Image: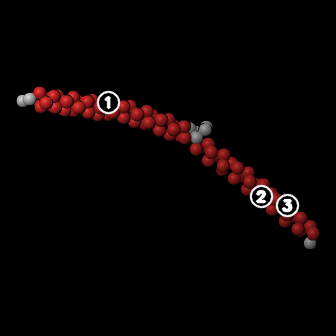
Amino acid sequence: MSGIEVASIIGITFVGVGLIATWVRNGRNQARYLGRLETQVENIQKSLADENTGLGSIKKSVEAQEKHCAGVTSGFEERLKNLEKRKE
């Protein structure tokens, strides 16, 4: 083997080792990133499921407002009916 062939083999070996090291490092970084992402998603789900500040509390608030509006509207309807009856 000539010196050029030996240098080529050594160069290819270094490149191969470098690629493998890069793949391993990227895999570890990806695993850490996905772990953080899963934790963030779990925290968001816990926040949404909270009875005091989550979606359930918003639903309760909307239902309470709906009942209030229905009460106010029906009160106005009755008042208008009474006013119309008085005019007749």
Nearer to the camera, 24 or 8: 8
Number of other residues with Cα within 10 Å of mark 1, as a class: few under 14, some 14 to 19, many 20 or more: few
Identify the residue at image location x=58%, y=44%: 55
Number of other residues with Cα within 10 Å of mark 2, as a class: few under 14, some 14 to 19, many 20 or more: few
Identify the residue at image location x=92%, y=67%: 86
Nearer to the camera, 3 or 9: 3
Identify the residue at image location x=36%, y=35%: 30
Q: Which residue is mark 2?
A: 73
- Considering the numbered disc 1 on the image, is that residue within a helix, a strand or a loop? helix
Q: Which residue is mark 1?
A: 25
Q: Position of residue 13 (x, y in %)?
A: 18, 30
* Amino acid at the residue labelled 2: Thr
Quadrant holding the N terminus: top left
Q: Position of residue 69 (x, y in %)?
A: 74, 54
Gap between marks 1 and 2, in whole Å?
65 Å
In the visual, does 81 lie left or right of 10? right
Q: Position of residue 39 (x, y in %)?
A: 45, 34
- Considering the numbered disc 2 on the image, is that residue within a helix, a strand or a loop? helix
Look at the numbered discs 3 and 2 and tell me whether their residues touch, using CB distance below 8 Å. Answer: no
- Asked which quadrant contains residue 73, the reply is bottom right
* Amino acid at the residue labelled 3: Arg
Is any atom of residue 13 visible in this view? no
- Considering the numbered disc 3 on the image, is that residue within a helix, a strand or a loop? helix
Instruction: Judge whether 79 appears above or below 11 on screen.
Output: below
Q: How is the image coloured?
A: secondary structure
Gap between marks 1 and 3, in whole Å?
75 Å
Q: Which residue is mark 3?
A: 79
